[in-house]
Amino acid sequence: MKSAKQKVLCGADVVARDGFDFQGKCGLITNHTGVLRDLSSTVDMLKEKCSLTFLFGPEHGIRGDFQAGKNVTSYTDKKTGLPVYSLFGDDISESEKALTSLDTVIFDIQDVGARFYTYAYTMTDAMKLCAEYGIKFVVFDRPNPLGGIKAEGTLLDRRFSSFVGRFPTPTRCGLTIGEFSLMMNETEKIGCDLTVIPMEGWKRDMYYDDTDLVFIQPSPNIPTVDTAFAYIGTCIFEGTNLSEGRGTTKPFEMIGAPWLDSRAVIESIGQQDGVILRECSFTPTFSDYMNSFCHGIQLHVTDRDIFSPFAVGIRLLDAIRKTHSELESEPFIKDLLGTDEILKPDFNPDIFIAREQRKVDEWQTLSKNRYIY
């Protein structure tokens, strides 16, 4: 981490300062993270800059107050009087109809740089609609909280494409949301009329808290930057009968279950680079094992530069599988991992991690052609 905070202007701040030639009726895909440096809303800024007609929200809603996977309904925003349509849920046909009536669609949401985080696919699905209807698409870029140097994890197998992993990209991609939009627009042949408004002052070696920006939790269970790091490795436990810490004050930084022998697991894999694995206990107030006492393992990140969260997550999962007959994996784990390799009886975590990293390295070499910074 750098010793001094670096001044960064997000894409929205650049537009607030310099303006932009927005075309016709505009819609904004955003949530509570869509703010300027002074934490005023991008919505309020755009009302002065363009003909803002509709607002659209992703998973967790436009205010970020819905838990993961919950259907989000459409409503009228009390402050602006604008209709708010949900782009997440079982039936978004009404929302898509509203979106395709526009001339320009704007996207301003803070991403976390993880493949299984759904905001990026809300964006690319909207880009596809805009390409089909000849609508201009504008992305206000924001930092990748995990920086733009390292990519890791698996390269998704298209057989396991879903809303928690749409494209063959790494678990941790090392791109900003603007760079991701540029790459997917080209490699997935979306072909929409795309403009990315770059940040000013951000560099690839910056983590979010190296900037002078306030970190607003992008969703209910990503409260800190350290959580976002751990999330790369521990989100995979959503595909098992372990708790990933939802319902505690340290979601994704703790995993556990009533039957887990924390000490045995930690001793099995040993301490890992850049993180301390500590025995802990917790009782979730909601989600898996609600109101049940859990034995757990907490990840304390000590050096982000050398910490490989995905590798640690895989080694933990493999160790738990080998030491606990109680562990159950659900089909969802294949979607989260983008592969079914983990389910094979002869699975070797170190061979798997090394093989997938070679694929990720090749992908990252190609992704550098889309770097803005």
Image (cartoon, rainbow, N blue to C red):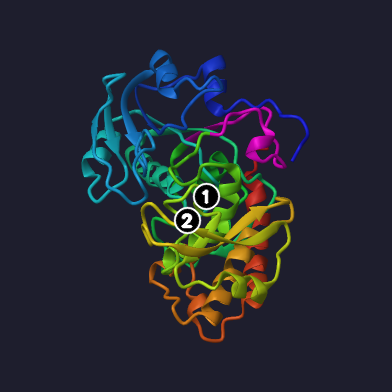
Residue 222 spot, x, y in % from top left = 50, 45
- State the image coordinates of residue 195 (x, y, percent, origin top left): 51, 33
Main secondary structure type of the part rendered in magenta: loop
Q: Is residue 199 magenta?
A: yes
Question: Which amino acid does the dot numbered 1 rest on?
Answer: Lys
Badge 1 or badge 2: first in the primary sequence: 2
Which residue is painted at 41% across and 13% down in the image? 48
Give left or right: position of 159 versus 371. left
Q: What is the spatial separation of the Cα atoms under label 1 and label 2, in whole angstroms? A: 6 Å
- Image quarter for residue 143? top right
Q: Quadrant of residue 24?
A: top left
Secondary-structure class at tag 1: loop
Residue 341 is inside the magenta segment: no
Residue range highlighted in magenta = 194-215
Which residue bears the numbered disc 2?
245
Label disc, if present, on residue 8 of the rendered structure: none
Label 1 crowd bin: few (<14), some (14–19), many (20+), radius 10 Å? many
Label 2 sits on a secondary structure element that is loop
- Amino acid marked by disc 2: Gly
Residue 353, how many percent across, how many down?
64, 70
On screen, residue 146 versus residue 231, left or right, reads right
Per the image, the residue denoted by label 1 is 250
In front: 140, or 20?
A: 140
Q: Nearer the viewer, residue 361 or 133?
A: 361
Residue 168 visible? The answer is: no
Extreme-bottom residue of the structure: 346
User: Label 2 near label 1: C-beta < 8 Å?
Assistant: yes
Instruction: Tell me which residue sits at (42%, 75%) in the image.
Output: 328
